[in-house]
Amino acid sequence: MEIVISGGKVAPSTDEITTPQAAKARQIANFLPRPELLQGAVIVHNQDDNTTSIRFETTAGPIRILLPVAQGFEFHIIHDSDTGPRILGTFRSTSPRGVSLSVRAVAFRISEFLRTRGLK
């Protein structure tokens, strides 16, 4: 499922968002290795902030994986709590050798982050 935030309003996506971030978010979601992650994944396009993220409902509340705005930047793992958003962790979109991570590798890292912290 995909939702769009525009003008402060949240609505289900009826038109396909064609940004590079949206395409990458869809690819990552398709490669999530565990069925419970794939079924619960929601892609959020926040047009007000010009960001795309993948959201999961977890035991601790909603967790968003904020996609980087450009190659070489970091993915941010954010917990949306009652007190506001809090960054739980980050990981780079490139390997130590400067090679871009595949969408499969990113999906695996997301899955492992949530699994090792008992969130999903």
Image: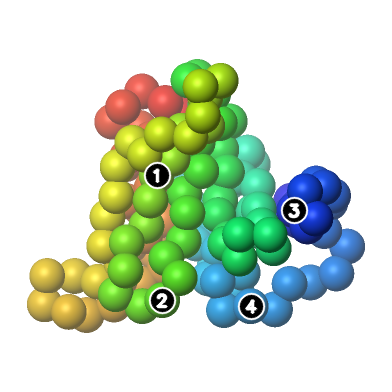
Question: Could you say where residue 68 lies in the image, as x and y percent from the top left?
Answer: 42, 65
Residue 55 pos. (x, y %): 57, 43
Circle number at residue 77: 1
* Mark found first going from the N terminus, 3 or 2: 3
Q: Distance between the residues labelled 3 and 1?
A: 19 Å
Q: Mark 2 = which residue?
A: 70
| Relative horizontal placement of residue 52, taking residue 11 as reference (left or right) | left
- Residue indicated by mark 3: 5
| Residue 31 visible | no
Q: Which residue is drawn at 80% across and 55% down?
A: 7
Q: Work out whether mark 4 precedes mark 3 in sequence or the reverse, and give the earlier one.
A: 3
Eyeballing the image, is 35 above or below 96? above
- The residue that label 4 is drawn on is 19
Residue at the image point whose x is 56% and y is 20% from the top: 82
Q: In this view, does 63 lie to the left or right of 40?
A: left
Q: Earlier in the sequence, mark 2 or mark 1?
A: 2
Return the x and y of residue 118 as percentages of the image width and height.
36, 23
Ranked by sequence position, the earlier of labels 3 and 1 is: 3
In the picture, residue 23 is in which quadrant? bottom right
Query: Circle 3 sits in a helix, a strand or a loop, which is it?
Result: strand
How far separated are the C-alphas under marks 3 and 2? 21 Å
Indicate the colouring scheme.
Answer: rainbow
* Residue lying farthest to the right in this orientation: 14
Q: Which amino acid does label 4 sit on?
A: Thr
Q: Which quadrant would residue 86 be assigned to in this image?
A: top left
**Number of residues whose C-alpha sits closer than 10 Å to that of mark 3, classed few (under 14), some (14–19) or many (20 or more):** some
* Whole-number angstrom distance, CA of label 2 to CA of label 4: 12 Å
Q: Quadrant of the C terminus?
A: top left
Q: Residue at x 46, y 61 (%)?
A: 67
